[in-house]
Each structure stands twice: as C-alpha cells, then as structure tokens.
C-alpha cells in the first residue's frame, strides 16, 4: 500500500511539474503586442496625434535594436550596459517631441520599469547554478 501511495505521489508531482513547464514554455513563445508601449505612452503622457506619428518610428527602431541585443551572444553585463545606452538614446530622441511635463512623466515610467526589471533579474539564478531541492528523501518504506 505504501509503495502504491509513493507511486501515486510521484506521478502526481510529475504531471503537475510537466504542466507548469509547458505553461512557462508557452508564455515564452507568446508574441508581445508591438503597440503596447505606444498605447501606454499615448494614455499616460496624453500624446497628441502628431506626437504619436512622430514617436512611433522611434519606438519601432529601438524595439528592433533591443530584440537584436537580447538575442546576441554577448555577456549579460555587456548586454545590460548596451541596453542602458539604447534607452538613453531613445529618451534623447523622444525628448524632441515631448513637452517638459511629458518628458518628466516618461522618465518616471522608465525608472519604474528599470527598477522592476532589475528586481526581476536579481531573483533569477545565474546560468549553470543548480536548483536546491527542498524535499527531503523519504525515510523507511
């Protein structure tokens, strides 16, 4: 009876683990809305139609550059440095079309976003580091 319960428990854990893994892999493949940032900026900064037309190509340009950078083989620290440079250049280009108040709001949004991303990356384990298992081995039968 104990061995049957152990087998059932192992099967249950395997099914749950496989389901969680499949969901996380599906989330990675989910395409992001390319207009999401534009929509957020339009709403939060109250962009005019003219500003939207001027800003959209800038966002698209930097979105492509960021994607290329993320897919590159360079070290993580190098990627982060280049990402910061890209974001600074993007801000400089966007500043040409934003009012001082909009620029201040945009800066606040990006600072919040950067802090959130940094917190997220700090929680990730470095590559190659193995996960510590919390389950204790079963004693006895």
Image (cartoon, helix red, strand yellow):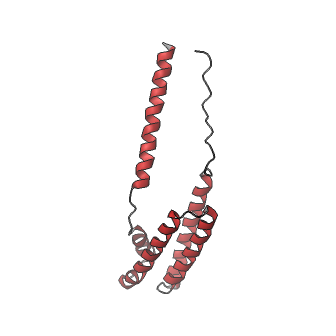
Residue 27 at x, y percent in the picture: 42, 52
Residue 34 lies, with reference to residue 15, above or below; the image says: below
Residue 34 lies, with reference to residue 122, above or below; the image says: below
Q: Nearer the viewer, residue 99 or 33?
A: 33
Residue 42 at x, y percent in the picture: 41, 75
Q: Residue furthest top?
A: 1
Q: Residue furthest left?
A: 49
Q: Is residue 55 left or right of residue 131?
A: left
Residue 41 occupies which quadrant of the picture? Answer: bottom left
Residue 42 lies, with reference to residue 74, above or below; the image says: below
Q: For the point 61% across and 16% down, which residue is it?
A: 140
Q: For the point 57% across and 66% down, which residue is it?
A: 114
Residue 34 at x, y percent in the picture: 39, 68
Q: For the point 43% across and 33% down, which residue is it?
A: 15
Q: Residue furthest bottom?
A: 96
Q: Quadrant of the C terminus?
A: top right
Residue 39 at x, y percent in the picture: 39, 71
Q: How many marks?
A: 0
Q: Nearer the viewer, residue 105 or 124?
A: 124
């Amino acid at each position: 009876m104990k061995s049957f319960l152990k087998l059932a428990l192992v099967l249950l854990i395997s099914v749950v683990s496989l389901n969680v893994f499949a969901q996380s892999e599906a989330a990675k493949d989910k395409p992001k809305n390319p207009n999401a940032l534009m929509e957020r900026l339009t709403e939060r900064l109250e962009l005019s139609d003219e500003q939207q037309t001027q800003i959209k190509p800038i966002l698209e340009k930097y979105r492509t550059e960021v994607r290329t950078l993320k897919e590159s083989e360079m070290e993580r620290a190098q990627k982060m440095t280049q990402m910061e440079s890209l974001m600074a250049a993007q801000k400089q280009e966007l500043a040409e079309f934003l009012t001082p108040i909009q620029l201040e709001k945009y800066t606040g949004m990006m600072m919040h976003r950067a802090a959130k991303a940094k917190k997220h990356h700090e929680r990730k384990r470095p590559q190659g580091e193995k996960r510590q298992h919390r389950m204790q081995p079963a004693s006895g039968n």
